[in-house]
Image (cartoon, rainbow, N blue to C red):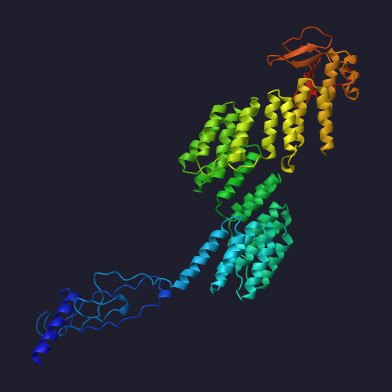
Amino acid sequence: TAGAAAAAGSRRFACSRQFCSGSAWMSASAPQQRQPQPPLPPQQLQQPPQPPQQLQHQQPVGGPAWPGSGDPPPLPPPMPAQWGSNAANGEGGPLLDQQPPQQRPPSRRQAEFLGYNSVLQAYASKGDKAANAEEYLEKMIGSNLEPSVQSYNHVLKAWAREGNAAKAEACVARMRERHCELNVVSYTNLTQAHAKSGDLEAAIRVLDAMRADNVMPNHVTYTVLVDTHAKAGDFARAEALLAEMESATDVELVPPPYSSLMHGYLKSERFDDAEVVWRRLRAKNLQPDPSSFTTLIQLRIAQGNFAEAEAAFEEMVAAGVRPHGCTFAILLTPCAKEGNFEKSEALWSRMDQMGVMPTVPCYNCMIQVYAKSDQIEKSEEWMTKLSRVGNGPNAHSYGSLMDAYAERGLPARCEELMTKMQSAGIKLNRVIHNTLVKARVHAGDLEGAEQCLKDMAKSPATAPDKYSYNTVFYGYVRDGQLTRAEEMLERMRKDGLEPDPQLDKALSRAYTQASATIPLSQLEGNSASFIDPGASRGVDWFEEVGADGGRRFRSAVGGEPRTSPPTSGLVQLQSENGPYYWDVASNTTSWELPAAR
């Protein structure tokens, strides 16, 4: 009817105005109706489909401009149903004030699958959670979810981190049993498991099996193999693997295998070979990574050239390569050993300015540098700072501060730190016990030092070593208790430790020095085997330590000691390794008594 037609025209007019926004007809050609394009399936969508552009209708030839008389242009096609409808006008067009929805969320089973894989990945990132990962994989299978190759790779990685090759092989067998194809990550993890377990030949066999399965190794595979062979000292195989990687046309060249080979040569003190690898890396036009630069800095320090180490650091910064905390720890280490706290503070300020997170070894170096420069209060301040960050101090941190206390002869302070270590769950290793022995010896408590040795012997992990016995031995020698020093050598031999020849010489010289001022008859019972009456012939002066800790020199023919060095004759001096001789006339020293002059 006429009324119905008018109403329909009115609806068409209102709807058309919404899409045309009052646009005029721009040309004489008839508008083409836009065909809707179906969206991609949800799993293929990269971005949500955009709504179609607003149509700009054109005026037909000879027709009136819209709005006006004549038929309106055709309506735009409706949008896909998944975008909703325009309830305001009852049509199937898009909701103009609503954004297209995001990608369709995963189903419940998909979400469950992703959850299992996330947990497996978390276990793989831990060093001691392989058993948990294996258990969770079984739980996944028990839930009727078939693991993917990524699922198995997480478990393989966990076993590889622990170096459990048997478990890794069992995981691979399970993959094959369930018809899950191994990829390059699977084989690389299996290679690493064998390499970390120390079976390098098995690791090479995995590489061969990988190629036979038409899976080509990548740069990670080669890095694992080069690194493990370099650490094992098999540099010929490491070099061959690196050359193989360089010649492969489908393997990306990266710095890590070069860094691993450099580091292996560095640890073996083959500094020239390490230099060759560095030049080889640069010849390939590869940008060194933080590990490469850090290894170069460590090489320069090992070569005794701190200035070149600093130059390598500046080159690293200029190249835009961000240093790691371990980079600064390596630079701080020689400063700490020398007690150079000014340089250490400057390096720490530089690290802070660059926003680099300091590692525990960085703090340890600061504790040690002030301990070496006899500023214990500063060492304690740095220990307090370390206690407030991360996991706090480690055994080395406590050991550095303990050594400062030991040098001052403060065994009680050392024992306080040992109590704190135990409260923090840190095991007391042999080095810590040796430091306490040192503290007691420096405090003159030789009986306490002997008791420390007995306590250490209670556990094979802390049983006394040569350093333990040597410390107590020299304590007895300096205290003049030569019989007890000789007994210490016998205890070492009973424990299967052969004393260094210097200890026998030190004891013999101590007896010789004593015989110069004490009648031989008074030394009977001490040990005639260490008395060499002829050794004192030609020795004119003996160095001693006075009650005030100062040096003094006693004449071999008697008389009061003097504090000024002798101007002639042969002088027997003292050192950490025992007595040695100074010929004043020629100004030369020697461990052995010079021939008759």
Q: Looking at this view, is 589 or 352 the one in front?
A: 352
Q: Is residue 439 above or below residue 166?
A: above
Question: What residue appears at the point 85 percent right and 13 percent down from the top-left corner?
Answer: 518
Query: Which x, y percent locates residue 473?
Result: 78, 28
The answer to whether one can see residue 557 in this image is yes
Q: Looking at this view, is 338 or 119 the one in front?
A: 119
Question: What residue appears at the point 66 percent right and 55 percent down from the top-left corner?
Answer: 227
Question: What residue appears at the point 53 percent right and 38 percent down from the top-left corner?
Answer: 386
Q: Residue furthest top?
A: 559
Query: Which x, y percent locates residue 443?
Result: 68, 23
Q: Is residue 310 above or below residue 149?
A: above
The C terminus lies in which quarter of the figure? top right
Question: What residue appears at the point 76 percent right and 31 percent down from the top-left corner?
Answer: 470
Q: Is residue 6 left or right of residue 333?
A: left
Q: Write down the quadrant of residue 458 in the picture.
A: top right
The answer to whether one can see residue 214 in this image is no
